[in-house]
Image (cartoon, helix red, strand yellow):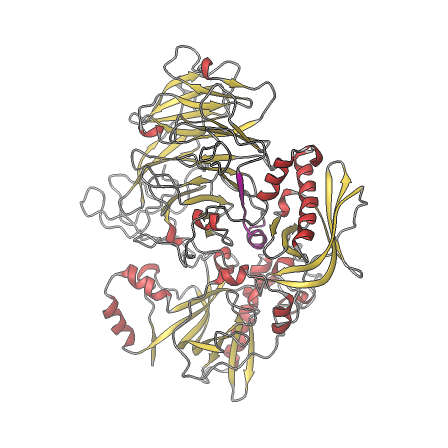
Amino acid sequence: MFVLKNVGKLIFGSNSQESMIELPQGQLYLVRPLSPKGYSELIFKDATARIRRTGQDFQYQLVIQRVYEEGEAELLDDEEGEDAELNALAAERDEKTFLLDEALHFRVESREGSQNVLAWKDLSGDVGDVYEFVCDPSINSAQVDTFERIARQCQYERKYRKPHSTASEADLSQFDFEEQPIPQASPIHSPTLARSIESSDAMFQLKNEANVGAKRAPSTSSVLSEPEPQPYEEKQAIKPKPTKQSGPPKPPAQPEPKEIFAMELGELHFFDFPSGAFVLQDASVTAQVSDIGNWNYWLHVASADRQWLGIPVIADINPVFNFEFLSFIFNQFTEDGSAYSWLLRFKDNKTLERFQDGLMRALWEQLNEVKWTKVKEQDRQYVLDAFEDLNMDDAPIEEEDEEEPGVEEPEYDAPQSEHYDSDEEQEDVETQPNDTETNSALAVGYKHDRSFVVRGPKIGVFKHTPKNHLEFTTNISKVETPNGEKFVPKKVMLHNEDRNLILQNDTDPNKLYRMDLEYGKVVDEWNVHDDIPVITFAPENKFAQMTHEPTFLGISRNALFRVDPRLSGNKLVDSQLKQYVSKNDFSSVSTTEKGYVAVASNKGDIRLFDRLGINAKTVIPALGEPILGLDVSADGRWVLGTCRTYLLLIDALQKSGKNEGKLGFEKPFAADSKPQPRRLALTPEHVAQFHHETGKGVSFTPARFNTSKDSEETSIITATGPYIIDWNLSKVLRGSKAPYIIKRYEDTVKADDFKFGTDQNVIVTLPNWVNMVGKQSLKRPTRESIAGDFQRLPATPRRSSGRIGTRESGRYKLGRDEVVNSPY
């Protein structure tokens, strides 16, 4: 007799309602027929297999859970103690979950002796690796057949985002995967410990044609290649097994080139979504970049007997040049909303350099509508360097970390909100917003542990607790001018030891407002200048908000200036105004600890100043895309710009010449030298997978360094869509592949920033949710983490918040994560 060690019930309640079907007994193996790591491992000697609903519509999980002999579970409970959180963590090793997606190629095989085997791909392992659940002989074939059918129905719902009741038998048959025979698993004496699977290593590895040929015939099937279906009609039946033809999309008609920028021979590889590897499509193709007129440019790839692809050269192709692998990786987006990733491999560096010159010329001219030949040579090299996979010259040499360091407590993401009145009940929990506004902006305190979230004409105040949670403190219910006119703040900035909040009303850009946070009301209205509108503003120096410094900086489209609230009349300091005759289209501003100033523009360039009122010491060339956000490290070494599809990390330290050791803020770079750029982008493979999951392209929120008075910057935080992304700075400088970790939420991330003084906690603002998340809950980008693990989010609203007593009772205990969903 066996029993499940379901410690998760202590926290999440029974999962009985979530399970749709269960096979009560079997063994789980990981079989690696082509791997030198060993043929197979016995993961669970005794286990159950079931299909479970998640908190997301049309998302289901295949769950394999270890079972224990009677008495064994109680013995382990005694050893682990009574801490529910520790037990929950321990339970993770006893359960493996897989998102039911056609990428798994889930299938069933009946063997001699009435033995049934379920098999599916290990998307995190090497090519050919499969998981096998060998059913106990006591399970009859009818149960297995039902399990397989439900699995197909779940895959159908995930793929088409509609109930399986609309599916015909032909529709479901596309998930009947015809693979080679399932390999035999190892006998019972195999090791019983599961291996630690590092999914990202396999996802990022470039598979050359020799390896692929030895393991599997080149496959063109890919979940990414499936277009979104049209609304279902009864007369329209989907042809069985469309995945047999689902691969690279058909190329459109090729426009007539007016001028050819590059034409080179190479190999063409296609990113196979299920296997997570680039698969050779054609060993000899011609890649051509051409000008087709009116600042439009075209990339065309074809072989002697086939047209492979044709796409416009735009920023969204997310180009990456890797000279180590002699490769060029890029994305393709089709009219039906599908996304793909391709790789061109060339024979040598010279060939790749010629192709790079041609493609970057096309991309530059398309973005800037300026001929590449008019760009200075050193500026051209700067642009080319930014799109290469390169290491910083003085990057620290460290061993690659296996995991990011964590904080003390695991995060719990179940959405919850509280009224926080004096009569609060222990189970008084809301899970839906009670107003029509959404959260839009975030300001994190430096002097005091507070965060401020803008929600329409209201501001919520949250306390950072010692256990790194958020606790709702108060609500500033009306943001209004001294004349009583309500407004929604467009931009907020803490000021004067975090006692004031500087606000801007989008409808009146020439004025700013000061809110006294002790009173919770706007007390001053400042007219900055009658003719110079304020685009955005920043503190006088990096840590000015921790001091009584009264002044701060502002920019307009073509001016940089100081604002001094102590002045009578207009608050702009005329003697510290730098105004340009041409329209530079400034977009963002940031400062260092010494007060050096960086100003970026929508043209994509960045100016570095050591003080106001003078010309910039250094002008960093534009790559072409507008810079939407800007941050600078406290010492001025690193400048971080945010573009829509990538981040730009620039080393402002001069390495040679008469100004060696000086920053670009202090002394200009030599004419033949420019700062070394680093373009931080998601890998094209991940861009395609993000797009497949969300239906949207990459659009980053303004990226920020972690900030501390006592330590240097180590991380960068940003977000795109429902994902927050944490970049490890040391890994970036070492040139590590995909040096970031991610976490997916159920809704779009509106704002995010590190808690002051650490890089281990991030404050995340969703439209109706504010949360402090520990870095340990962010994961390497894998098929599973990109799809999102929502198993902890219940399908119905939770009633228990995990609290004890009320605030006044002396027994009040914060929930697992003091998440507040529109409390104000």
Whether residue 751 is visible here, answered yes or no, is no
- The residue positioned farthest toward the front in the image shown: 658
Q: Which residues are magenta?
A: 676-695
Task: Specify whether 482 is left or right of 589.
Answer: left
Give 38 or 106, whichever is nearer the viewer: 38
Q: Position of residue 528 (x, y in %)?
A: 45, 17
Residue depicted at x 65% and y 53%: 349
- The residue positioned farthest toward the left in the image shown: 810
**Above-or-below relation of 822 to 81:** above
Task: Specify whether 145 is left or right of 538.
Answer: right
Give 397 or 248, whichever is nearer the viewer: 397
**Above-or-below relation of 27 to 82:** below
- The residue positioned farthest toward the top in the image shown: 568
Task: Specify whether 472 is left or right of 640.
Answer: left
Magenta residue check for 496: no
Whether residue 766 is visible here, answered yes or no, is yes
Q: Position of residue 556 (x, y in %)?
A: 52, 22
Q: Position of residue 485 (x, y in %)?
A: 43, 21
Give 35 or 27, whichever is nearer the viewer: 35
Give 369 or 422, whichever is nearer the viewer: 369
Quadrant of the snapshot with the N terminus: bottom left
Magenta residue check for 677: yes
